[in-house]
Image: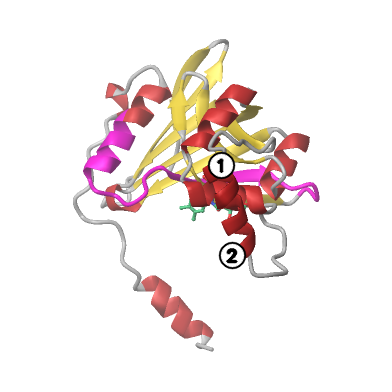
Amino acid sequence: MSEPQAAQDLLRNAPVFPSVLPDFDPDRTPDSPLELFLDWLSNAIDAGLPAPHAVNVATIGQDGMPDARVVILKDVGEQGWSFASSSESPKGRQLKVSPSAALNFFWPTVGRQIRIRGKVHQGAARENAQDFRRRNPVARALVLAGRQSDVMTSNPDAAVRGQLERLEADNEIVPPDWTVYTVAAGTVEFWQADENRRHTRLRYSWVDRRWKKELLWP
Ligand SMILES: Cc1cc2nc3c(=O)[nH]c(=O)nc-3n(C[C@H](O)[C@H](O)[C@H](O)COP(=O)(O)O)c2cc1C
């Protein structure tokens, strides 16, 4: 076990953002956060950032405590930001009771963060099925074999093998709990790091059926 002081030193000496960061002029931003998100996403992909589509999703637990985990962004459009999971998982049960969420993208090599908050809508059966069928067979077999986040009491190999055989016999199988969740953004905030700590924050808020833009203190 390291000393508390050693942990503080470790943290203080941790690498920070690169000194060359992309320009961000909030005066030259589009009216819609979707357009800016897609621009930043392509920039993150071009910069070679690993897993730029991995996003932290925060939900409200049934005990009132926040909960968060990383998922993969499956789609984004006028309807919102979509990810997929089991409605029987803890996050799925939380979203059933409190259908709202916060998403957080952090792209360190370009010094960027995007925060999204909004109501969550569940996908229609066709959309859920389409997403599930696009998954890799092992990922599908895992969903079919057990309930996500349940305590594992036995070796899962045989159960997964069994589900893979089931999928080989019928590739169309879709479990009823697989769900696409779409966060309809009420606010979207873009945060750009600056090497001199003059970070820029631009927040879009959906007010009176249009996007309002405001700068926030860092
Ligand atoms: C990079 C990455 C991507 C992930 N993608 C997903 C995903 O798309 N869907 C999902 O249900 N879990 C995904 N997970 C696993 C979740 O983080 C989490 O462990 C799981 O969904 C159970 O969460 P819950 O107990 O809060 O419901 C991913 C984890 C990581 C680290």
Magenta stretch? 39-64
**Badge 2 is on which residue?**
157
Which of the two labelled residues, at mark 2 and mark 1, occupies the earlier sequence position? 2
In terms of image quadrants, where is residue 208?
Answer: top right
The quadrant holding residue 57 is top right
Residue 183 in sight in this render: no
Tag 2: Cα neighbours inside 10 Å, few (<14), some, or many (≥20)? few
Camera sees residue 167: yes
Q: Which residue is mark 1?
A: 169
Query: Residue drawn 53% across and 37% down?
Result: 171
Query: Which of 176/17 is in front?
Result: 176
Q: Position of residue 181 (x, y in %)?
A: 60, 32
- Report x, y in % for residue 82: 52, 32
**Element under disc 2:** helix
55 in the magenta segment: yes
Mark 2 Cβ and ligand 1 under 8 Å apart: no
Q: Compare residues 97 and 200 and report the one nearer the observer.
A: 97
Q: Which mark is residue 142?
A: none
Q: Place residue 93 in its image quadrant.
A: top right
